[in-house]
Image (cartoon, helix red, strand yellow):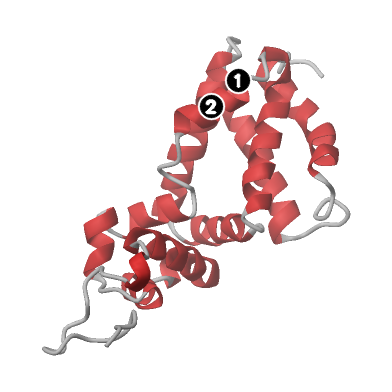
């Protein structure tokens, strides 16, 4: 008999990590986590609920991710995505177009996820300080920070923080509050409107308009 994701073994224990038709347990957990975090934020989503949605034992969360924090980081903040590749993509635009590179890259990622990933991120970081620390570690220190450093200007940490504020604000308006016409604007329109501000944050004079 072919087993289903929720079928138990003869001894009553749940099947651990083996999914039918060659489905990958890790991928199933990531997909389930995104849905749970989008529904209830970091605090509301439990390891058991995520595992149940994925059809695996809760122990698989620790096995693959070491706990809810890392699962959140990978599922919602896309860690580990190839951080070096993201930074390389942005910096490939050249110093005078770094702002465009940031906006186009982030809008592409969020639009591709239908905005749900960003919505889950906002719900989680506003309700849980651990999630906020994860966001800072990934968005500022690992992504925007290196881009600001590549701009080779003064006060790179301040510049990175300013860029992060713009990126998060854009995500809030486009995917959470859904301000129109920004929410439905095509990426080129968003890039043209927002990228110059990010570019000034990265390479402009912060002491004068």
Q: Which quarter of the rendering shows the N terminus? A: bottom left
Which residue is situated farthest in the right direction here? 181
Residue density around tag 1, few if under 14, some if 14–19, many if 20 or more, within 10 Å: many
Q: What numbered label is drawn on residue 48?
A: none
Residue 176 is left or right of residue 88, and the answer is right
Residue farthest to the left, as pictured: 11
Q: CA distance from mark 2 to mark 1?
A: 6 Å
Label 1 secondary element: helix
- Seen at 24% across and 60% down, the residue is 62
In the picture provided, is 178 more to the left or to the right than 33? right
Please name whichever residue, 133 or 85, is drawn nearer the observer in this view of the structure: 85
Task: Name the residue at 54% across, 66% down.
Answer: 38
Tell me where residue 122 sits by quadrant.
Answer: bottom right
Residue 65 location (% of width, % of height): 29, 54
Picture coordinates of residue 196, whole percent (x, y): 79, 26
Write the residue at 80% across / 55% down.
183
Decide which of 22, 49 is in the foreground and name it: 22
Please determine whether, in this image, residue 132 is positioned above or below residue 188: below
Residue assigned mark 2:
87
The answer to whether the residue labelled 2 contacts the one labelled 1, judged by CB atoms less than 8 Å apart, is yes
| Residue nearest the viewer, comparing 133 with 106 | 106
Decide: few, some or many residues near mark 2? Use Cα within 10 Å; few <14, some 14-19, many ≥20.
many
Find disc 1 in the rendering and name its residue: 91
111 vs 77, left or right, is right
Q: Is residue 124 above or below residue 202?
A: below
Q: Residue at x 51, y 34 (%)?
A: 140
Q: Is residue 203 above or below residue 23?
A: above
Q: Is residue 63 left or right of residue 21?
A: left
Quarter of the image with the C terminus is top right
């Amino acid at each position: 008999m072919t087993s289903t994701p929720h079928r138990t073994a003869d001894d009553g224990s749940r099947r651990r990590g083996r999914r039918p038709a060659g489905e990958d347990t890790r991928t199933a957990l990531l997909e389930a986590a995104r849905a749970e975090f989008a529904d209830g934020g970091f605090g509301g989503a439990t390891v058991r609920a995520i595992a149940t949605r994925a059809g695996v034992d809760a122990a698989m969360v620790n096995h693959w991710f070491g706990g809810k924090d890392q699962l959140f980081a990978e599922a919602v903040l896309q860690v580990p995505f190839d951080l070096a590749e993201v930074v390389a993509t942005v910096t490939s635009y050249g110093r005078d177009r770094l702002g465009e590179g940031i906006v186009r890259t982030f809008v592409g990622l969020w639009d591709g996820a239908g905005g749900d990933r960003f919505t889950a991120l906002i719900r989680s970081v506003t309700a849980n300080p651990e999630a906020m620390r994860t966001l800072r570690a990934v968005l500022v220190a690992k992504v925007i920070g290196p881009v600001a450093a590549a701009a080779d200007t003064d006060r790179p940490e301040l510049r990175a923080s300013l860029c992060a504020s713009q990126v998060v604000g854009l995500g809030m308006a486009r995917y959470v509050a859904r301000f129109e016409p920004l929410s439905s604007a095509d990426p080129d329109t968003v890039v043209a409107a927002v990228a110059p501000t990010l570019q000034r944050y990265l390479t402009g004079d912060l002491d004068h308009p």
